[in-house]
Image (cartoon, rainbow, N blue to C red):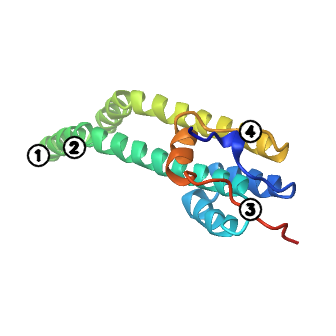
Amino acid sequence: MSRSHRDLFRLESDNSIAGVNYISCLIGGWIFSLIMVLVSQKRSEYARFHAIQCLAYHIVIMAISMLASFASMPLMLRFMREWIQEMNSMASSGPPDPMAMWGMMFDMYAAMWPLWVLSGVFMLLNLTIAIVGMVQAFRCKDFAIPVIGPVVMKWFFKEAPVTVAAVG
């Protein structure tokens, strides 16, 4: 029988450590999440789950961001090539026309609007996960990020619940 994040052993004091993990969604990034994973190793499974879940979330977001950056490279290179060609033709015909340069820059930014929308969606998703995760963890409620939470449970919490002595 597969375990759920609801089956994790937790200490009453670990809700604050679990909640602090979600601050890394707003500031600190994956380095803060990695530090929290190391800190939570001596805490309960509940704190460890939230730390590993936040780190996994950052890894997924970084991978998606890199893919989006690589996907936009051909478009950016095309605009750079056109811009260089236009600048060369302007240089041979006299002083550059500022309006033409602004027009080329506008064309480049207008073509990039899908990436801007995607970036905005990711920022809202990040903010939502951070706020919901913090509130739920501070209240000692169960919270698993969709898709990421179950994968973390499956990969890192296969064994029986660990007994952890109260720290502190």
Q: Residues within 10 Å of mark 2 (few under 14, many from 20)?
A: few
Q: State the image quarter where residue 146 is shown.
A: top right
Mark pair 4, 3: CA separation: 19 Å
Q: Which residue is mark 1?
A: 92
Q: Which residue is mark 4?
A: 142
Mark pair 4, 1: CA separation: 67 Å
Mark pair 3, 2: CA separation: 56 Å
Q: Earlier in the sequence, mark 3 or mark 2?
A: 2
Which residue corresponds to the image point at 63% horizontal and 49% vertical from the top-left?
25
Mark pair 2, 1: CA separation: 23 Å
> Callout 2: helix, strand or loop?
helix
Q: Which residue is mark 3?
A: 163
Q: Amino acid at mark 4?
A: Asp
Q: Earlier in the sequence, mark 2 or mark 4?
A: 2
Q: State the image quarter where residue 2 is shown.
A: top right
Q: Amino acid at mark 3?
A: Thr
